[in-house]
Image (cartoon, coloured by chain):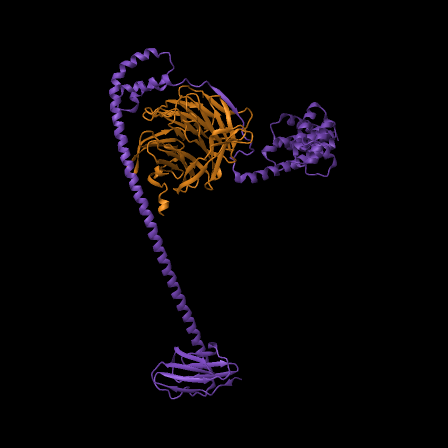
Chain colours: A purple, B orange
Amino acid sequence: MPVWLREHRWRQTASAVYLSLPVRGLRVTPANIFCTDRYLKVSIPPFLFEAILYAPIDDTNSTAKIGNGIIFFTLYKKEVAMWDSLTLATANKEKLQYLRENAVLKAHEKAKEETEAKKVTKQEHKKYALEATMKLEEAERKRIEDLKEKERQKVTEELELWKKQQDAAEKQKRVQKEGQLHQEVVQLKEKKQEKINKTRIPNEGTSETRIKATKGCRGSYSMFSENLKEEQLPAPRSTATIKINFTSRVFPTALRESRVAEEEEWLRKQAEARRTISDDLAELEDLKEEEKNPDWLKDKGNKMFATGNYLAAVNAYNLAVRLNNKLPLLYLNRAACHLKLRNLHKVIEDSSKALELLTPPVPDNENARVKAYVRRGTAFCQLELYTEGLQDYEAALKIDPKNENVEKDAEKIRQLIQGTTQDS
Amino acid sequence: MAAGLDRPQVVSHAQQALNYTLFDCKWVPRSARLLCLGSTARGSGLLQLYELRGGRLALLREIEKAKPLKCGTFGATSLQQRYFATGDFGGNLNIWNLEAPEIPVYSVKGHKEIINSIDGVGGLGIGEGAPEIVTGSRDGTVKVWDPRQKDTPVANMEPVQGESKRDCWTVAFGNAYNQEERVVCAGYDNGDIKLFDLKTMSLQWETNIKNGVCSVEFDRKDVNMNKLVATSLEGKFHVFDMRTQHPTKGFASVSEKAQKSTIWQVRHLPQNRDIFMTSGGAGSLHLWKYEYPSQRSKKDSEGAEMGVAGSLSLLQNVTLSTQPISSLDWSPDKKGLCVCGAFDQTVRVLIVTKLNKV
């Protein structure tokens, strides 16, 4: 329960009310005072003073002076009239409550309005400042443009003048030369006799024909001056070639400094990818760099197969497979070796592995697939598993129907199968 | 601002929108006309002759050829004839008489692949010696042609048998100060720059600048070789001092990184050999001035002469387009007048002011 302050005193004039409220010993700040146009409250917990004013006041202009243990209010009346009392005599608690709330709401709204108004004025000020700077910059720019424009005009005039001079000079020259033309015709006829042996410039022919069609073109007098000059020019250089080397560059694109780092990175990764994957095989340390390269080993294996050294070829392929087991050709070639060595189960294994790796079946690996099927088929037949063999041969035929050898062998196997079924 | 306006300004004088890809543009010597060449959408080559009239370019002639044209030069013709040499996408070198362009004056299938770059020397009243044309191609060879000799080049710089080839992107003549001396400088896509001496028919110097070389040019073709500018990818360019060659270190150089994009071309001002313009992949042009050091050569620890490179200062830069400016040419007759062609299918005529005060 607040402690009500009731020791207030007031007096009034026609337009204002003066209210003094003693607040002995209490510290009062403006925050403690709350005032709207019908309601005045001073709240310094636990003390409380409130007054529901008799008539509305102008709360924006009214003032409160805090000092000396007294708050002195100067309230300006909205209507000039004498009040009967400071406050409205209302005993109704609800009405009081309602009035209080109303007052608070009104105060809120007022505050809002004030902030809005402030914002608006701020924006306007900004806009104005912006426009002013824009105008200044515009003026500056225009000044520079004008200067440039003046320069441009001056220069254009000079250029026109120069052009006229050029044209005049050319016309003069032309007239002069045409005069000389007639004089030199005779001279030239004599000179021509001498110069029959010398090499001619190919365009001399055309300039001669143009003499007939004189139209003041530039070339009409050129023949004469050319012939004279020709004697002074050295002969064409003797042909020679200079061989050059370029700074090596792996990429076909132009060299750019900013890309060098990326390119180095790419090359390093490529080199690593070709190297051995498994470093823990002790034997591999003994091998030279090239012997670690599966492609090189495959080539070696092929050569040995060609010379008939099948065991050595198999060794080469084995090592290559250890290094890189994803190359189908290694298995394919090893299958061929095993076939020659009659290790038929191994043939089947290797051809199967090769076929596995040769997925997806595309035209590019047709040849390889045909070979794989044929080798496996042969192995099956030699193991007397003729039906499986025939299956493989037929698969080979499906890929390459034009292969006669495969066709013949397939026929033979069919005969064999029919022969055996007939027998049994 | 006042200090800024004392520098040379690049003023845009005229421009023309084209309906084909422009690869090269060149001024016709002793005139206010320029030639644009390139490739049309239908895969044929196009040569257009424009004249500068007022603030506009007026089309005078249009010549269509079978293969797209990549590069061209007036360098090897006399001032009276003004024949134009072009290299095209099929590796053919042709010299055209612009008055009668149906049949070339000289034609040879010089290379197996596109001719990327061409240069001519000995013509236009500049320098002495026989007029020659050099072409550099994607097939890795650099060939020097004499218009008086049909079918075979007078010099052929090709890779050793078995060597994988690198694209040659740019060639330039230099050191043609008398009848015998001449060098050819070639830049390749792997960053190699090679200098060939045509008098001794040997490789005089080579180096690698770590980025593909887009353009090389000597500051003057017809003097004792003085400076060589090589531009490359990644926005870098190098200026080599060519007066002093050290036996192992070669030529001294200073390099500059102007912009993040490729520097497509470098061209020296014909009237002042220390000023040059570089054009970039972001559509910008930079105007540079080279300052010589107080001593151009010094002795190293063994007593051999070594060159000293100078310094570069940027005079002006301007961005004209969003696409690379692939070709640039100064007018040899009017100081400051230049034409540039960009991949946004526009050819622009520019005037650079205040070059007298630089």
The quadrant where residue B133 appears? top left
* Residue A114 placement (x, y as % from top left): 41, 71
Q: Quadrant of the C terminus of chain A?
A: top right
Along the viewing direction, whichever of A276 and B169 lies nearer the viewer? B169
Indicate left or right for B355 with B300 as reference.
Answer: left
Q: Measuring 38% from the left and 27% from the top, which residue is drawn there?
A: B75
Q: How many marks?
A: 0
The quadrant where residue A294 appears? top right
* Residue A97 placement (x, y as % from top left): 47, 82
Indicate left or right for A298 with B140 as reference.
Answer: right
Indicate left or right for B133 with B166 as reference.
Answer: left
Along the viewing direction, whichever of B324 and A283 lies nearer the viewer? B324
Q: Measuring 32% from the left and 50% from the top, which residue is drawn there?
A: A142
Res A203 visible:
yes
The quadrant where residue A131 appears? bottom left
Along the viewing direction, whichever of A214 and B225 lies nearer the viewer? B225
Q: Against B124, is B328 above or below?
A: below
Res A207 visible:
no
Along the viewing direction, whichever of A37 and A401 lies nearer the viewer? A37
* Residue A369 placement (x, y as % from top left): 64, 32
* Residue A409 placement (x, y as % from top left): 67, 27
